[in-house]
Amino acid sequence: MSQMFSRITLALIIALQMTVWAGENLSINELASSGASVAFQENDNVPINQLPSPVTAAIKNRFPKSELLWAEKDWEDGNLRYEVKVRSKGQVYDVDVTPSGKILKIERDDS
């Protein structure tokens, strides 16, 4: 039993080291209840012109005459969402939007 646990632990350590060596920017998202597997979350940048039209429509509806600065795809609790940085009337906002165009969160970016 302890030998099997050691092999699983060693396999996880090797997998994590290979990820680091590959230069990927991955973070641990969650651990399975058994502790034997690890799930990773990776944020993906999305070109503004490739955002789903409901996402851009929702943002343009909420922030008329705004500029979309950048976007990334993100998974939260197993659900896809887009995080979009928006400039409107001299202020910058972080807006989280579902693929169907529902705005989940708006935060002013004061940095």
Image (cartoon, grey):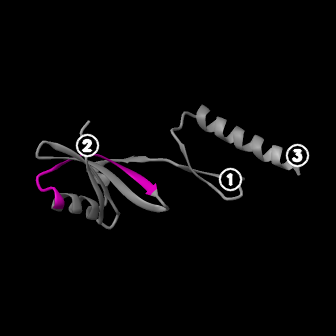
Residue 74 lies in magenta, yes or no?
A: yes
Residue 99 lies in magenta, yes or no?
A: no
Image spot of residue 83 (x, y percent): 34, 52
When asked about the image quadrant of residue 63, the answer is: bottom left
When asked about the image quadrant of residue 23, the answer is: top right
Q: Is residue 71 above or below residue 52?
A: above
Distance between mark 3 and mark 2 Cα atoms: 50 Å
Image spot of residue 62 (x, y percent): 17, 60
Q: Quadrant of the C terminus?
A: top left
SS category of the residue bearing label 1 = loop
- Side of 32 relative to 11 (left or right): left
Q: Which residue is mark 2?
A: 109
The kind of residue tagged 2 is Asp
* Residue at 68% in and 53% down: 37
Crowd around label 3: few <14 · some 14–19 · many ≥20 (10 Å): few
SS category of the residue bearing label 3 = helix
Image mark for residue 53:
none
Tags 3 and 2 touching, CB below 8 Å: no
The kind of residue tagged 3 is Gln
Crowd around label 1: few <14 · some 14–19 · many ≥20 (10 Å): few
**Magenta segment main secondary structure:** strand
Image spot of residue 93 (x, y percent): 23, 47
- Side of 89 relative to 13 (left or right): left
Q: Which residue is mark 3?
A: 3
* Residue at 34% in and 63% down: 98
Image spot of residue 18 (x, y percent): 65, 36
Q: Which residue is mark 1?
A: 37
- Segment colored magenta: 62-75
The kind of residue tagged 1 is Ser
Tags 1 and 3 touching, CB below 8 Å: no
* Residue at 65% in and 35% down: 17
